[in-house]
Image (cartoon, rainbow, N blue to C red):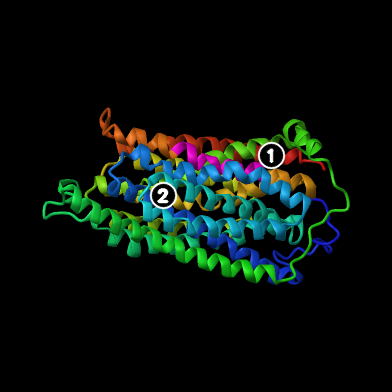
Amino acid sequence: MSSDPTLYRGEDDRVVPREYLVPFILITILFPLWGFANDITNPLVAAFKTVLEIPNAKAALVQFAFYGGYATMAIPAALVVKKYSYKTGILIGLALYATGAFLFWPAARYEMFGFFLVAYYILTFGLAFLETTANPYILSMGSEKTATRRLNFAQAFNPLGSLLGMLVATHFILALLQSDERDAAGNLIYPTLDAAEKAAIRAHDLVIIRDPYVALGVVVLIVFLIIAFYNMPKNKSEVHTPTREIFRRLFTLPEYRKYREGVIAQVFYVGVQIMCWTFIIQYAEHLGFTKAQGEEFNIIAMIVFVSGRFIGTWLMKYIEPGKLLFLFAVGGMITIMGTIFIQGMLGLYSLMATSLFMSIMFPTIYGISLKGMNNDDAKLGAAGLVMAIVGGALMPPLQGKIIDLGQVGPLPAVNASFILPFISFVVISIFGYRTFRIHHATPARA
């Protein structure tokens, strides 16, 4: 990105220059906040399926609503940031986030799946503002040379929020769901009950689902107040390019081909992340585990992911980001092949190991795609990369449909469904390869 009179004060090669330390910390707090929302939500696909007695494909509409909100609001968020400031975008995002979280109260009261989907949709309007704003803001807090490492470092705190979300989902939601209680043979009791008993359990379980989101809304409001009263660094540029001209450059300039390919890679990355972390529960259930036990495996996968994020950030000191992305994508292809073709616990372990290779992908694709852009182009370019999160809306319902088949040839459908993550890793590996073999020689020009 080009120099900005307020956000750039010389070429300090430290990952986080001293003058940006407090703003960096405040913005980095946002990363675990949306990580928490992502990963308290993923296991609830299975919870809604059971308590509302709906098929996997319909339950996966939770992901469609959740990640569809990103696609809807990413460009409006970028336009707000371009016209006003990063801080304004962050405050709007936090306000929308809290509003969506509080809507879980009436959704549980009226026991309407559609109302829950609306709450998720509005909540992710806020997340779209936060991700569209926070990622480029972090990139701009120092030298362009260290920008991708800086974003990987900030993003390393995202899975800490994800871990907390998984722990809350496991111990304060899934473990308390009466609809998931089983008899001595391991069969669900809930489907055998009469209408009155089901109604009482449904009301109880929807309240269990509701409460963590309402508490989350309170936390988000507190963060809103802290950032509102702190004097954050400005991001006003000396030159403002017309929005139409920026879009023309993003979509047509040969120098931005890397960016356009990065958006496609990001669609497939978010899809593979959400599929692996959502349907690990169904994979475990196929092996005889409960939902809560399945989420325990997801927590281990997230610990692997956190470790990979810090390891990957360190490796970038020695291996250029594009090459590391390619190597990690190949690793993901190998572990997903194990998930598909190895039945039993080894297949589950292979699925958990996939998180190691996913760990660096989002921030690395993001940083590679925006590298070399000027400030105005990067703001709207960021919107395209956040809109790419729609991959998390499109692919899980498709995987859910495959799982609902029960059997695909010689393989259980839950195993075969992971062909979709495999295809996604192939696309990401191509982007990584082209980055260090082709795009590295033709950097973008402002």
Side of 351 where 33 appears, left or right: right
Q: Is residue 151 magenta?
A: no
Q: Give the magenta range.
A: 383-395
Give the residue at mark 1.
259
Tag 2: amino acid: Trp
- Residue 394 inside the magenta-drawn segment: yes
Residue 277: assigned label: 2
Which residue is at a point 81% across and 41% down the rendered structure image?
445
Q: Residue furthest right?
A: 238
Q: Amino acid at mark 1?
A: Tyr
Placement of 311 over or under 258, stated as above or below: below
Task: Give the percent coordinates (x, y) of residue 54.
Answer: 30, 41
x, y percentage for residue 66? 49, 47
Is residue 311 shown to the viewer in this render?
Answer: no
Q: Secondary structure at mark 1?
A: helix
Label 2 sits on a secondary structure element that is: helix
Residue sitting at x 64%, y 47%: 366
